[in-house]
Image: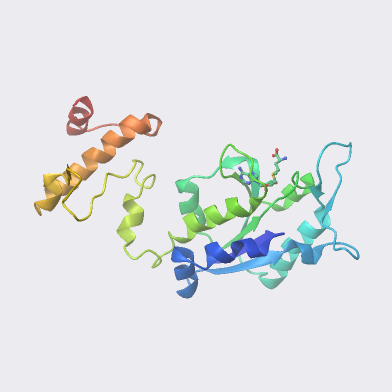
Amino acid sequence: MKIDVVTLFPEMFDGPLGHSMVKRAIDKEAVEINRVNLRAFGKGKHQQVDDTPYGGGAGMLLKPEPLFEAVESIEERHPDSKKRVILMDPAGKPFNQKMAEEFSEEEHLVFLCGHYEGYDERIRSLVTDEVSLGDYVLTGGELASMVMIDATVRLLPGVLGNADSAVTDSHSSGLLEHPHYTRPAEYKGMRVPDVLTNGNHALIDEWRHKESLKRTFLRRPDMLEGRSFSKKEEQWLEE
Ligand code: SAM
């Protein structure tokens, strides 16, 4: 997969791209991530990328020409790739695991990071998706795109050590994940549930499913709307 990120702050990506799963994905050549410095497409002696809004009002807006030219430069480098151009936008569709799964199946993702008060509206003519990280306003699209890149890249084949962990992760299965324990078996008077130490994998799977379901029911009942339950699941929820 190819990822291009158009940003005024390419150096912000140094840390997140240099560690853990994203670094592993880059090292394994599962993904190639390129930062496109918007400043390089700025206009005039000062490489201006922003300007005041027509009609007045607070703040500066990213000008259309540098953004268009940055996207065109990606098109020139990769004329044949099928691109999904994703605008970071607090007014966009909320990002979720399903979207990460969808993105992970694409050939080429292009993230556009806004800054200041936002961008000239005409940039939307270039984008395929307008996506929000959540209902709050960040200073720029960089952190939002890094979160989306992380959630997407860890799903690429061969990136996670154990592919099963992505399948059972919260939100992948439609349920929150069950509790986990590791050694020691007892700590400060708190014991690991016996079922996890008895080696019976059928019972362990059943316990995990039950705990996932109960946790989802208690914390995120909205995730269970429209779901049908087996007799056993109904009993668990009544306990
Ligand atoms: N005035 C804009 C508004 O009210 O929608 C907010 C501008 S914000 C300070 C600057 C940029 O950060 C946005 O253009 C967008 O690219 C990015 N951004 C801020 N919050 C975001 C969020 N929740 N999700 C995705 N991108 C966000």
Q: Position of residue 178 (x, y in %)?
A: 27, 44
Quarter residue 182 falls in: bottom left
220 or 1, nearer to the observer: 220
Q: Position of residue 16 (x, y in %)?
A: 53, 62
- What residue is drawn where x is 47% and y is 74%? 27
- What residue is drawn where x is 80% and y is 42%? 59
Q: Is residue 43 left or right of residue 31?
A: right
Give the residue furthest to the top: 238
Ligand 1's quadrant is top right
Quarter residue 4 falls in: bottom right
What is the quadrant of the C terminus in the image? top left
197 or 34, nearer to the observer: 197
6 or 233, nearer to the observer: 6
Give the residue furthest to the front: 188
Q: Is residue 25 left or right of residue 203?
A: right
Q: Is residue 218 left or right of residue 71?
A: left
Q: Position of residue 35 (x, y in %)?
A: 65, 66
Asked whether residue 62 is in view, the answer is yes
Q: Is residue 7 left or right of residue 106?
A: right
Asked whether residue 82 is in view, the answer is no
217 or 130, nearer to the observer: 217
- What residue is drawn where x is 88% and y is 37%? 56
Q: Position of residue 132 (x, y in %)?
A: 59, 43
